Amino acid sequence: MALDLPAPLGTYFNAGNGPDIAQLTQCFAEDARVLDEGEWRQGHEEITRWAQDARAKYNFISTPLAMEGPAQEPIVTARVEGNFPGSPIELRYRFVLAEGKIASLSIA
């Protein structure tokens, strides 16, 4: 059963599993921040570079399994499979949404 994710999250996971990094970046607000692997990236340029690098390095697929939390701060648990030690793993994606875009994302 597929999760009914809010529009920017559904687009984020769909685009993130494919080659269209521009579509993924458009899910984010202009000044959005992403925390992944202990490093913050901010703004479309840095988020685009982060997404391209992660795709090339890990060649991963993220499958959302569950969503919890308030509508503007959802937490999505996803199964992530790719070219990295311990694959597959479950990661928690903590989002902050604002005006129909992702304002912040923390992945752990």
Image: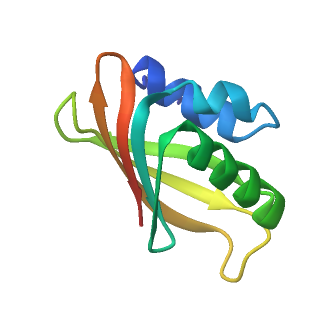
Image position of 48 (left or right of 97): right
Numbered disc total: 0
Q: Is residue 7 above or below residue 82?
A: above
| Most foreground residue, 45 or 9 | 45
Image position of 23 (left or right of 71): right
| Most foreground residue, 55 or 60 | 55
Write the residue at 80% across / 70% down: 83
Q: Is residue 101 above or below residue 94?
A: above
Structure colour scheme: rainbow
Image position of 62 (left or right of 29): right
Q: Is residue 55 above or below residue 108?
A: above
| Residue 40 in which image quadrant | bottom left
Residue 97 locus on image (x, y percent): 30, 30
Q: Residue furthest bottom?
A: 85
Q: Is residue 85 above or below residue 31?
A: below
Residue 106 locus on image (x, y percent): 38, 56
Quarter containing the C terminus: bottom left
| Residue 25 in which image quadrant | top right
| Most foreground residue, 47 or 68 | 47
Write the residue at 42% across / 26% down: 5
| Most foreground residue, 57 or 74 | 57
Image position of 92 (left or right of 72): right
Residue 10 locus on image (x, y percent): 52, 26
Residue 31 locus on image (x, y percent): 40, 36
